[in-house]
Image (spheres, grey):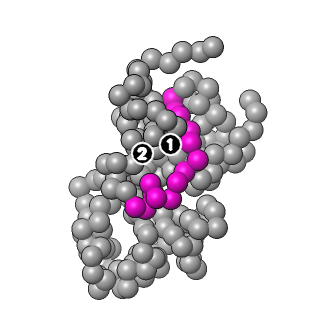
């Protein structure tokens, strides 16, 4: 299969996706190379707010307006670990640089900064991530499990999580009600 790089793209789960982790999800791909892919689900909140997460990990909350931000289920890998998708990049202890504006950070220092002064302002906190081994995502794409589209930052950071999937589909000119559960192969 031809090599592709879906870093900084959305994966849109097709309606036939039966995997309970990924059904009806929108995934942001933070890294895709010959070793595999890594991303976070950006539209599945869990029953936890950022304020309660910070309390659980003993990080005092001083910044206003962030306590009620939802924490999202980022994927089935390392669900006990937090990942922060953010812009701008900043200088953190452990950041995967996605592009010149967006990073995915897994170190505690970013949560401490957000709790202290609300910076970086554009953050999305997930527990867990989604990972694919070498060639696995390409195989799933060939099986019509996903649609792909270049990511747009306004969907990531400005839209409520419940609007993100439909907005990503609109980037492709697709009305979600027109998607069918079966895929065809030409």
Percent x, y of residue 10: 52, 46
Does residue 122 appear left or right of residue 71 in this picture?
Answer: right
Q: 136 or 15: nearer the eye?
A: 15
Which residue is at 61% across, 26% downward?
Answer: 142
Crowd class of label 1 (few under 14; some 14 to 19; many from 20; radius 10 Å): some
Real-space CA distance between mark 1 and mark 2, rounded to the nearest whole angstrom: 7 Å
Q: Is disc 1 placed on a helix, strand or loop?
A: helix
Magenta-span inclusion, residue 157: yes
Element type at marker 2?
helix
Start and end of the magenta stretch? 145-158
Tell me, for residue 171, which label it has, or none.
1
Quadrant (top left/top right/bottom left/bottom right) for the C terminus? top right
Residue count near mark 2 (Cα–Cα under 10 Å), binned few <14, some 14–19, many ≥20: some
Q: Is residue 95 visible?
A: yes
Q: Is the Cβ of the residue at disc 1 closer than 8 Å to that at disc 2?
A: yes
Q: Is residue 51 left or right of residue 28?
A: left
The residue under the point 32% across, 60% down is 71
The residue under label 2 is 167
Position above or below: 116 against 20: below
Of 87 and 78, the residue lying toward us: 87
Residue 11 is situated, as x and y percent measured from the top left of the image, at: 52, 41
Q: Residue at x 46, y 76 (%)?
A: 120
């Amino acid at each position: 299969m031809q090599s592709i790089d879906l870093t900084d793209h959305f994966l849109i789960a097709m309606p036939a996706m039966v995997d309970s982790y990924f059904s009806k999800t929108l995934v942001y791909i933070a890294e895709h190379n010959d070793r595999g892919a890594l991303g976070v689900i950006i539209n599945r909140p869990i029953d936890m707010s950022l304020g309660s997460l910070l309390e659980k990990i003993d990080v005092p909350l001083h910044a206003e307006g962030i306590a009620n931000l939802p924490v999202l289920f980022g994927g089935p890998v390392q669900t006990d670990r937090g990942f922060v998708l953010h812009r701008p990049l900043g200088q953190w202890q452990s950041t995967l640089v996605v592009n010149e504006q967006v990073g995915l950070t897994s170190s505690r220092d970013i949560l401490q900064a957000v709790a202290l002064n609300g910076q970086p302002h554009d953050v999305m906190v997930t527990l867990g991530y989604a990972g694919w081994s070498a060639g696995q995502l390409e195989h799933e794409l060939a099986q019509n499990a996903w649609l792909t589209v270049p990511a747009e930052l306004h969907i990531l950071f400005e839209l409520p999580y419940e609007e993100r999937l439909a907005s990503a589909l609109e980037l492709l000119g697709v009305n979600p009600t027109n998607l069918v559960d079966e895929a065809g192969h030409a």
